[in-house]
Image: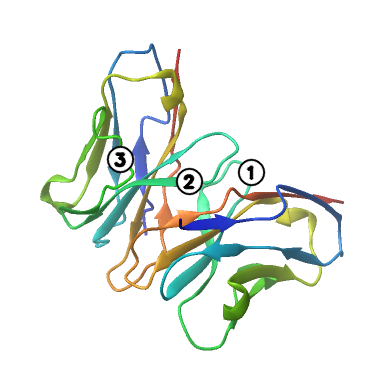
Amino acid sequence: AQSVSQHNHHVILSEAASLELGCNYSYGGTVNLFWYVQYPGQHLQLLLKYFSGDPLVKGIKGFEAEFIKSKFSFNLRKPSVQWSDTAEYFCAVTNTGGFKTIFGAGTRLFVKA
Amino acid sequence: EAGVAQSPRYKIIEKRQSVAFWCNPISGHATLYWYQQILGQGPKLLIQFQNNGVVDDSQLPKDRFSAERLKGVDSTLKIQPAKLEDSAVYLCASSPPRGHEQYFGPGTRLTVT
């Protein structure tokens, strides 16, 4: 069955700590990969995306993610988090036609000032 | 650019009643999605429209849920009759032509008592 797994449901970090959120997927065929973020009181918004090409993609606010095809993973990273990064982060997968979107359960990140 | 609009923002109904949600996507976005997000879970795709045609409704509980997108612009999602387990946030999203990133609205929080 198609699925997206986010390993950590809750993460607490201090400011300036490094962040890595795991995302693994089970999905037949070639995929498009996304990370979305929902800041408190705001809509879900796109953080970054991977369609093809360089497996290391950079998004907004200093975030990046690496697609490792052999591991079916698309982990999100940021070298130094800020209090303003407190949010819920969702990994999502679609097929290359943009259909059959599946979201992970999300990871709540709390950054202590 | 105006974002995805949804109404109402909140709705409380009793079980067995009916309810309808409205969504107006970003102008020019051909693809429209409805998601159900239950507390503590990621969004679950209910239905995807391309213009005014349905391209995926495999996870829509068709015995009680229906959706339409007349004229290929705004859309309504209806639940009739509602059950307690339908309590969730209903998200609408849209995508531009030739793009698969999704732009989300604020959602409608439904409580079924």
The amino acid marked with disc number 3 is: Leu
Helix, strand or loop at mark 3: loop
Nearer to the camera, B6 or A72: A72
Numbered mark located on residue A40 in the image: 1
Q: Which mark is residue B31?
A: none
Crowdedness near tag 1: few (<14), some (14–19) or many (≥20) residues, C-alpha within 10 Å: few
Q: Nearer the viewer, residue A57 or A74?
A: A74
- Say which chain tag 1 marks: A
Tell me where residue A20 appears, x and y as whole percent. 75, 66
On screen, A67 above or below B7? Answer: below
Would residue A67 be visible to someone looking at this image?
no
Q: Is residue B57 left or right of residue B92?
A: left
- Residue beneath the point at 51% across and 60% down: A92
Read off the residue under disc 2. B43
Kind of residue sitting beneath label 1: Pro
Foreground label between 3 and 1: 3
Q: In the rendering, at what x and y percent does residue A79 appear?
A: 79, 72
